[in-house]
Amino acid sequence: MNVLIIGNGIAGTSCARMLRRLQPDHASCRITMISEEAPYHFSRPAMMYISTGQLTLEHTKPFADASWAQQGIALMHGRVTALDAVGRSCTLDDGRVLAADVMVLATGSVPSVPAHLDASLRGVVTYMQLADVQRLNDVMKGAHHAVIIGGGLIAAECAEIFACMMEDRDSSTITCVVREDGFYGNVLPDHESMIVTEHLRRHGVRVVTNTEAVRLVDVDGRVTMVELSNGTHLPADCVVVATGVRPNVELASAAGIRCDEGILTDASFRTDHPGVLAIGDCAQPPWGVRQLWYTGRLHGEHAARIVLGQAGAFTPTTDFNSAKFFDLDWSTYGMVPRSSDAANSRLLIDRDGVRCIRLAHNDAGCVVGIHALGVRLDQRVCEKWIGGRVHVQAAIADISSVIFDAEFTPSFNAVTA
C-alpha cells in the first residue's frame, strides 16, 4: 500500500508516524509526506520562541532529521499545485506527479486577511508560517510603531515578540486593534477578557477596543499608518494582520472534493472521494472544524488506524486549549461560552483579583466546561467532572483537587459575574 500525506504539520506527522508504528514493514506500507513550508516537521506553537531568540528552529523539531529515513517515511519539500481526487495523485510545482492508494489531506490553515487590508505592502506581515518568523524579524528592524490588527492568540504572541525584540523599546509603541470590548473578547467572558486586556496594558501594549482597521495607508508601497473605523489614524511602520485563520481547502476544492468551511468528511475522516481522507485544521467532520494542536494529533493517529482497517468512526474528546498572555496562563476544557455569566456559570476569583476559575454548567447545574487564568488545571480532574456530569456545587466544594499548581493553593471566592 502506498500512502501519500500532503502536509507535515502535527496532523500529517502524527498520521505518518502512527502508520509506521502500526505497520513496521516498509515494503507493505510505503509512506510519503509532502510539505511546502518546511522540509521537516517543527512545533508551530514554538514559533514565538524562535522570534524572541529563546529557541532555534532545531530546538523545535520533535524528531531527529535522520529518524524519518530510518522509519521509511519519505519526505518531499515542494509545493503541490494540483490534486487528482479520482486518481489519488498530486502534481508538484516541478512537474512531478505522485500517485497513491490512499491520499491524506493535512493542509492545515491559512491566515484570514480581510480584503480591504493590503497585506502586500512593505512592513505588513501575517504570523502563521515558518517563513513569517524571518519576515517579522525583517520588518521589526528600525520600527518604532507596531500595530497588531486582531485580538486573539496570534496577536498576543506578536505583542510579546514586539515587547521583547523592538530595538528601541522606550521610544516605541505597540498597539493592538480589537473589535470587541476587550482582548480575546470573542472567546473569553467579559470579566476574563478585561483581566487579559489590563495585563497586556501593564506590559506596555496599548489595546484599542470597539474599533476595526479599515485601511492601511502607505507611501510608495510602504505602510505608514492604520486607519480605524472610529476615525483614528495610528502611526505604523510595522503591521501584523492577525485577524484569524481559515481551513486551507483550495487544493481540495479545485479537485472537486466537497468543501464547506473545511473539507467535508464523515466521522472516519473520509471525504466524498474513495481513498481520500482529510484531517487536522483543514477537515470538517460532522462535529465541525477544530483548529487545535491536540486535535490534529488525535486526528492523525486515528486516521492511520482507519487507513490500515484497524478502527471505525472517531469519537471527539473533551475540547482543550491553552495559551499564555505574556506571563499569564490560560487553559480551558469543555465549553465555556463567551456569554458565560451568573446564570450559566460560577466564577471563582483569588484575592489578587487576577487569578480566576470559571465553571460553566448546564440547566441541570452539571459542569460542561472549566477555564482558568493564572492557575494551572489538572486535565484528568477537568475531564472527569465534565464527562461525569458533576454538579457545579460539588465541583466548587472540591476545587482544590482541580488546581495543578503545587507551589501554592489560591484562596478563591465565588462572585456574581
Image (cartoon, rainbow, N blue to C red):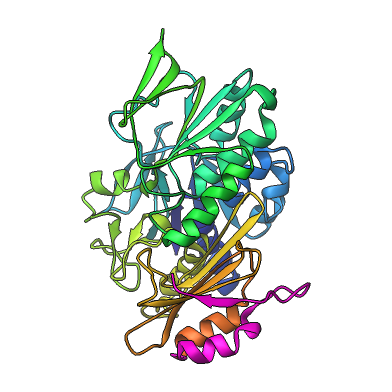
Quarter occupied by the C terminus: bottom left
Side (left or right) of 91 relative to 156: left
Q: Nearer the viewer, residue 139 or 371?
A: 371
Q: Residue at x 27, y 53 (%)?
A: 85
Residue 288 location in percent, x, y? 31, 65
Residue 312 location in percent, x, y? 38, 80
Side (left or right) of 295 relative to 264: right
Q: Is residue 390 magenta?
A: yes
Q: Nearer the viewer, residue 97 or 13?
A: 13
Does the rendering let one see residue 31?
no
- Which quadrant would residue 67 be assigned to in this image? bottom right
Magenta span: 389-417
Residue 83 location in percent, x, y? 31, 46
Furthest residue to the top?
220
Q: Is residue 399 magenta?
A: yes
Does the rendering let one see residue 163?
yes
Q: In this picture, is 120 found above or below 248?
A: above
Q: Residue at x 38, y 68 (%)?
A: 337
Q: In this picture, is 417 found above or below 79?
A: below
Q: In this picture, is 256 found above or below 374?
A: above
- Which quadrant would residue 382 be assigned to in this image? bottom right
Quarter occupied by the N terminus: bottom left
Q: In this picture, is 107 found above or below 112?
A: below
Q: Residue at x 46, y 49 (%)?
A: 183
Residue 291 location in percent, x, y? 42, 58
- Which quadrant would residue 140 be assigned to in this image? top right
Q: Residue at x 52, y 60 (%)?
A: 293
